[in-house]
Amino acid sequence: MKHLKISGNLLKLLLFTGLLSSCNNNNESITPNEQSLIEVNDQNAKLISTPKLSQDGTRTLEYFTLGRYQGRLSKVTEVSHYTEYSYNDNNGSTDLWITSRRYSKANNALVNENKYRVAGGRCVASVALPKIGQ
């Protein structure tokens, strides 16, 4: 009887140490096997952002809230027209080009288009482009 009690206790001890040793493997840190090819600050990333809206009298101003051009003007909506802005600093120089396109709300026709060249935070050139079809 004594032998059965000792062997039972030894078996319980072995099971208990087995459980404890298996729990220690879960405390190891997880490391990835391969490097990620995604850059955190990818300048060419295309993100969909919801614009931030502001009111200025009868005009509604929309700003980019995410992405590369965060905080910059996206669209100005007026009573009969709306103006969309696009930005390009990936043009082979350090200058920023801003394109302003004004459309009629009645038929979404392009009214006029302007391009602005910004260098060092100042507008150094502006070009009024002719409307399509003129």
Image: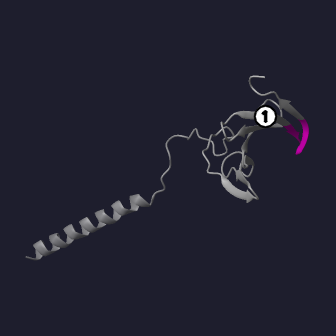
**Which residue corresponds to the image point at 78% horizontal and 30% vertical from the top-left?**
91
What range of the chain is rendered magenta?
Answer: 117-125
Which quarter of the rendering shows the N terminus? bottom left
Q: How many marks?
A: 1
Residue 101 percent coordinates (x, y): 75, 37
User: Can residue 95 be seen?
Assistant: no
Nearest the camera: 123 or 5? 123
Horizontal and vertical percent position of residue 127: 86, 32
Q: Is residue 118 magenta?
A: yes
Which residue, as the protein is rendered here, is positioned at the far top? Answer: 133
**Residue 1 covered by magenta stretch:** no
In the image shown, does 45 or 111 lie closer to the viewer?
111
Instruction: Name the dominant secondary structure of the magenta segment.
Output: strand
Query: In percent of the image, x 73 and y 52: which residue is there?
Result: 71
To which quarter of the image does residue 20 belong?
A: bottom left
Residue ID for mark 1: 112
